[in-house]
Amino acid sequence: MNEKSYLEIRIQIEKDALFSLSQIETLNELETWRINTLGRNGKVTGLLRGISDLPVDSRRKAGGEANSLKNLLTEKYESQKSGIENKENNVTGNGPELLDVTLPGRSISLGSLHPTTAAVREICQVFESMGFQTIEGPEVELDKYNFQKLNIPEEHPARDMWNSLWIDRELPDGSRPLLLRTHTSPMQIRTMESQSPPVRVVVPGKTYRYEATDATHEWQFCQIEGLAVDKDITFANLKATLEEFARRIFGDKRKARFRCDFFPFVEPGAEVSIDCFKCEGDGCRVCGNTGWIEIMGAGMVHPKVLAGVGYDPEIYSGFAWGMGAERIAMLKHGIDDIRHFYSNDMKFLKQFS
Ligand code: PHE
């Protein structure tokens, strides 16, 4: 073969290929065209192979021509392909060309407060109006604050009240004192250590327990701690403050009940309940037929705890409480499972916007 006939063949292939391509309407046909033209045994590939049959001084030009044909046809193939794809998509309605400007716009979702956040804010506001300051503290705590200074010594069985998630991190002295706080009570100590009386704080925040989850237990939840320390603080102040809180959150008519309970950092300790807002005390499903609903733990700050932070228990006294924010929200909204708060289910969350 000589250069002239080689170039003629090239022009013929180009003409044929472009013509047949222009007739193609489906992706199947297009694929057959690609195989016949650009495929391993296709015409263009044959043309490229034919270069070696040419005299050496013609090969360079012929190679350039054959390559430009390959590029041209590849380009045409790609654009034909996307053309067909767009058309097909339009038929099924997925294509970028299918823009119906008469459709109504999509509304922008503004989002809303998570029910736990909403409860925390509402609860803290009630206490703020009584002169308490809202503060926050660390979620990774030291044994010293989570337990020891709250009158819960190392190895003491009272620790079993709080199933703890310990952090596997050794300090230079070989101790492993870090854990995810099991309650917000360590902030009682941190607050008293950093200021002198009078103290009035509320501390909302996340707490963690090594616990199996069920309708009333989560391994991560939110507590709200409260602490008041001053001269002449008595149990009457505790009662009045928490009863006022219960009325502001659950209605004017609420009565509060205080019964003995044990927490190592208070003495006396109490379990605080309100009379059932659903059945007014007659007994129903919400209150488990008892007429009362437990809402928090509380008590007078233990003299040992006061002494431990350098407050003189002969001069100062105080009260503290701790409640679960989700529990309050559950009671308020009639939510029957605490796991809803942490499952990110929009159907649940949207009810509180
Ligand atoms: N920290 C206690 C708990 O997690 C609750 C509590 C706080 C009780 C303050 C008394 C006083 O169960």
Image: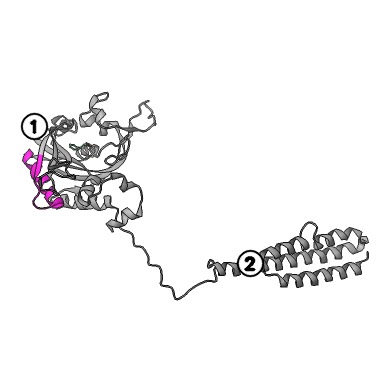
Q: Residue at x 21, y 32 (%)?
A: 150
Would you identify the image quadrant in which residue 188 lies? top left
Q: Which stretch appears magenta? A: 234-257
Q: In the image, is 98 to the left or to the right of 309?
A: right
Q: Which mark is residue 82?
A: 2
Tell me the amino acid under the disc marked 2. Answer: Ser
Instruction: Using a 10 Å C-alpha cutoff, classify the residue at mark 2 as few (fewer than 14 neighbours), some (14 to 19) or many (20 or more).
Output: few
Tell me the amino acid under the disc marked 1. Answer: Glu
In what element is the residue under mark 2?
Answer: helix
Q: Please tell me whether residue 305 belongs to the stretch shown in magenta.
A: no
Q: Quadrant of the C terminus?
A: bottom left
Q: Quadrant of the N terminus?
A: bottom right
262, 46: nearer the viewer? 46
Measured as percent of width and height from the top left, residue 327 is found at 23, 45
Mark 1 and mark 2 lie on one chain; the one further toward the N terminus is 2
Q: Residue at x 18, y 44 (%)?
A: 285
Q: Which mark is residue 257?
A: none
Q: Residue at x 41, y 72 (%)?
A: 104
Q: Is residue 234 visible?
A: no
Distance (Cα) linking label 1 and label 2: 86 Å
The residue that mark 1 highlights is 314
Q: Is residue 58 above or below residue 148?
A: below
Tell me which image quadrant ligand 1 sits in. Answer: top left
